Amino acid sequence: DAKARGRGAISVYDPAMDAAARDRRALEVDLRAAIERGEIGLLYQPVLTVDSGSIGSAEALARWTHPTRGPIKPDLFIAIAEESGLIVPLGRMLLRQACFDAATWPEHLSVAVNLSPVQFHAGDVQDTVVAALADSGLSPHRLKLEVTENVVIHDVERTFVALERLRAAGIKILMDDFGTGYSSLGYFRRFPFDEVKIDQSFVHELETSPAATAIIRAIVGLGEALGMAIVAEGVETCAQRDALVLAGCTHLQGYLFSRAVSSASIAALEASGLFDRVVL
Ligand code: C2E
Ligand code: MG
Ligand code: MG
Ligand code: MG
């Protein structure tokens, strides 16, 4: 409301707010149609393994090009999909697409798929995952699911039970954007995440903030003690890369190496050995 936005309680009617709400509603209508027509696609961003300097996996990132507005930011259309419940059919579609795409890649490459808390709490995540794996023929150990801290806050016990079942099936569970949400170290006591992705805000502050370096080192220490791989995302410069390798991050992802590319390009990039010397 107006108060929460820090503008006092005077402005009861805000035409700008009204326009923004109508705009969002219009986008929701277009998004629904785009989902029905299968127009939301996926690109894949390589994640490098520091030890080998090669691609170990790629993160599936949703892309929507609106017929008149052009590309819409995923942060925006995913949020609209979450508010409207459209994330359930959309998420199911994207998960299936990612599994079918990854099944065409070399065997040692995995795919990481982002899962929304809403998808989780709608209750059909497990069935969706099992069906996507069975239909695509992708082995469960080649699928990673990325969840944020926000997935856990609502119904902690139910969520961890669901995550445990998926993990028992051989799927890896990643904590995404770690350090920005309602972080609780207790989650790591309760659930053995396979990997933790350090939020890119820490990576971007590396050169200017001693606190960012200290936090990254602490997360790496936690990872080493608990057997979790540590991924740094948003790596844009060689200085960041060097600091992250020095701090002990095991995996790196960012524009320095590659933006998100088509499924076909993932296999090609990997075969080209382009990354062999990038990390070390
Ligand atoms: P995320 O899961 O944390 O994904 C990483 C984001 O960082 C991606 O933004 C990626 O393009 C961007 N990125 C990667 N390297 C760099 C870099 O070096 N510099 C900078 N500045 N950014 C970099 P993108 O594709 O715009 O996606 C934004 C968010 O939207 C994702 O954050 C994720 O939360 C959500 N999202 C995207 N695709 C999906 C999806 O299929 N399902 C769900 N539930 N959420 C998705
Ligand atoms: Mg992610
Ligand atoms: Mg992330
Ligand atoms: Mg994010």
Image (cartoon, grey):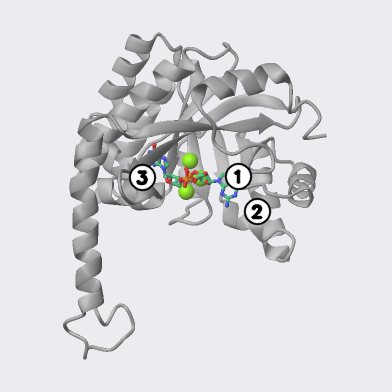
Mark-to-mark CA distance, 3 and 2: 23 Å
Q: Which mark is residue 151?
A: 3
Amino acid carrying label 1: it is: Glu
| Ligand 3 is within 8 Å of the C-beta of the residue at disc 1 | yes
Residue 239, position as x, y percentages in the image? 79, 51
**Residue bearing the label numbered 2:** 203
| Ligand 1 is within 8 Å of the C-beta of the residue at disc 2 | yes
Give the mark nearer the N terminus: 1 vs 3.
Answer: 3
Q: Residue pushed farthest front?
A: 68
**Residue bearing the label numbered 1:** 233
Quadrant placement of the N terminus: bottom left
SS for tag 2? helix
Residue 53, position as x, y percentages in the image? 75, 28
Give the mark nearer the N terminus: 3 vs 2.
Answer: 3
Q: Is residue 195 visible?
A: yes
Structural crowding at the residue carrying mark 1, measured as other residues with C-alpha within 10 Å and reported as few (<14), some (14–19) or many (≥20): many
SS for tag 1? strand
Seen from the viewer's position, the closer of residues 157 and 12 is 12
Residue 15 appears in which quarter of the rendering?
bottom left
Mark-to-mark CA distance, 1 and 3: 20 Å
**What residue do we see at 28% from left, 45% from top?**
155
Give the mark nearer the N terminus: 2 vs 1.
Answer: 2
